Image: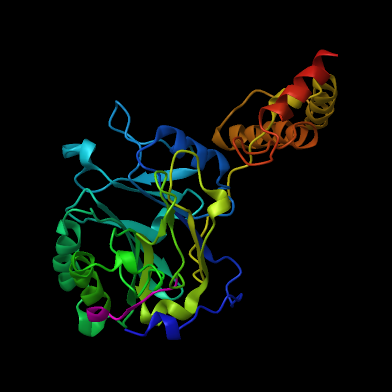
């Protein structure tokens, strides 16, 4: 493994015009925290949201909105109350370009993404403080799926999440109180895995990822590791304490990777609340008059011709007089205020 202290991340734009951007966040199982995150994250700016300790409701589901596809752990529905990892994937990313990788753990969700750099598998991990069961399960899984001798091949990895381990490789070296013999022993398995699979650390060493509520102390339980061959593709990897959602002491970790998967253009949505109906009816009447009187339909070809003409007349009026709507629940988008102003205008 390359020493992360000697391998600084170069914060620069590279070749891709549409890099992958992710938000990693532990929300402490808080509904308020998860709703705050969903309300403030811009789905036009982020492709993945990797959540640890998500809120699970009485229906055994987490919370999301229509901008995201929710990926649960493989065993979630068998024992939903133990789920501590959920991944949200932007609906803008073509489903032909990603698939879930099935890991038999409710503490891991894994997604394989196809891009110009080959296949990259993201592992969203929650590892408990009191044991290493998740890391041991992943060690067996990774050894089978990603043999160490092929770690620099086309199938690269990103590990990210809450590892709950402390070590001078990533914690502030001045935080000597964290480097007890017990903590060093607990972290050794993770350190060994990083070396075995030739992983690097794009999140700069010494950067804290949590400020505990009780004491206000800073430490680094959350982390990001990637295949060494993928390190140069990280444009950004940093914490954003100022964006921390309510009711969580974990900082967001924001990352940008120079991958460019196929994206889908969002469908055009019309704001029918803002239509000036007199103008619409006038335009539609002119368009239908231009079509002329419709004769009785005699056969299939005649039907298709008439159908196309009528559809074009209606669509032309829609394009002229029905404005496109802004996506709802977007930061600074106006949201309900935009249609409320239209309703007031029409009422006047």
Q: Is residue 187 visible?
A: yes
Q: Is residue 289 above or below residue 92?
A: above
Give above or below for 147 relative to 30. Answer: below
Query: What span is colored magenta in the figure?
Result: 195-202
- Judging from the image, the colouring scheme is rainbow
Q: Name the residue at 29% across, 25% down.
A: 58
Answer left or right for 96 relative to 108: right
Q: Quadrant of residue 96?
A: bottom left
Q: How many marks?
A: 0
Give the image quarter of residue 192: bottom left
Residue drawn at the location 80% of the way across and 20% of the way down: 277
Horizontal and vertical percent position of residue 267: 59, 43
Q: Is residue 343 above or below residue 287?
A: above
Looking at the image, which is closer to me, 225 or 323? 225
The picture places residue 80, in percent across and down from the top left corner, at 22, 37
Residue 317 picture quarter = top right
Name of the residue lying farthest toward the top: 347
Q: Note whether 291 is above or below 70 in the view shown.
A: above
Q: Is residue 294 visible?
A: no
Q: Which residue shows up at 24% across the image and 70% down it? A: 190
Q: What percent of the width, then of the height, locates residue 54?
A: 35, 42
Judge by depth and name the residue closer to the eye, 96 or 218.
Answer: 218
For the residue pair 172 and 285, the one nearer the viewer reads as: 172
> On the picture, is 159 further left or further right than 249?
left
Q: In the picture provided, is 287 more to the left or to the right than 47?
A: right
For residue 11, side relative to residue 283 (left or right): left
Quadrant of the snapshot with the N terminus: bottom left
- The quadrant in which the C terminus is found is top right
Residue 166 percent location from the top left of the image: 30, 65
């Amino acid at each position: 493994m390359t020493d992360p202290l000697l391998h600084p991340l170069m914060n620069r734009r590279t070749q891709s015009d549409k890099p992958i951007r992710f938000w990693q966040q532990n929300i402490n199982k808080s509904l308020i925290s998860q709703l705050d995150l969903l309300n403030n994250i811009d789905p036009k700016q982020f492709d993945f949201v990797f959540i640890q300790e998500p809120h699970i409701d009485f229906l055994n589901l987490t919370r999301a909105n229509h901008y995201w596809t929710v990926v649960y752990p493989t065993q979630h529905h068998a024992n939903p109350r133990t789920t501590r990892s959920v991944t949200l994937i932007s609906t803008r990313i073509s489903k032909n370009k990603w698939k879930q990788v099935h890991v038999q753990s409710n503490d891991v969700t894994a997604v394989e993404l196809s891009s110009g750099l080959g296949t990259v598998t993201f592992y969203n991990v929650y590892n408990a403080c009191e044991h290493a069961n998740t890391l041991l399960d992943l060690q067996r899984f990774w050894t089978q799926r990603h043999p160490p001798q092929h770690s620099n091949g086309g199938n690269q990895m990103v590990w990210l999440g809450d590892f709950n381990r402390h070590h001078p490789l990533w914690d502030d070296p001045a935080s000597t109180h964290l480097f007890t013999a017990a903590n060093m022993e607990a972290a050794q398995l993770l350190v060994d895995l990083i070396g075995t699979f030739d992983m690097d650390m794009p999140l700069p060493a010494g950067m804290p990822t949590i400020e505990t509520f009780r004491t206000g102390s800073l430490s680094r339980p959350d982390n990001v590791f990637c295949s060494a061959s993928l390190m140069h593709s990280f444009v950004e990897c940093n914490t954003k304490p100022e964006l921390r959602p309510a009711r969580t002491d974990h900082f967001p970790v924001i990352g940008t990777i120079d991958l460019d998967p196929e994206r889908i253009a969002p469908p055009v949505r019309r704001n029918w609340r803002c239509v000036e109906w007199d103008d619409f009816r006038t335009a539609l009447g002119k368009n239908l008059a231009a079509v002329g009187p419709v004769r009785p339909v005699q056969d299939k070809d005649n039907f298709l011709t008439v159908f196309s003409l009528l559809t074009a007349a209606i669509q032309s009026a829609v394009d002229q007089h029905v404005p496109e709507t802004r996506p709802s629940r977007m930061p600074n988008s106006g949201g309900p205020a935009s249609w409320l102003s239209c309703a007031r205008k029409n009422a006047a």
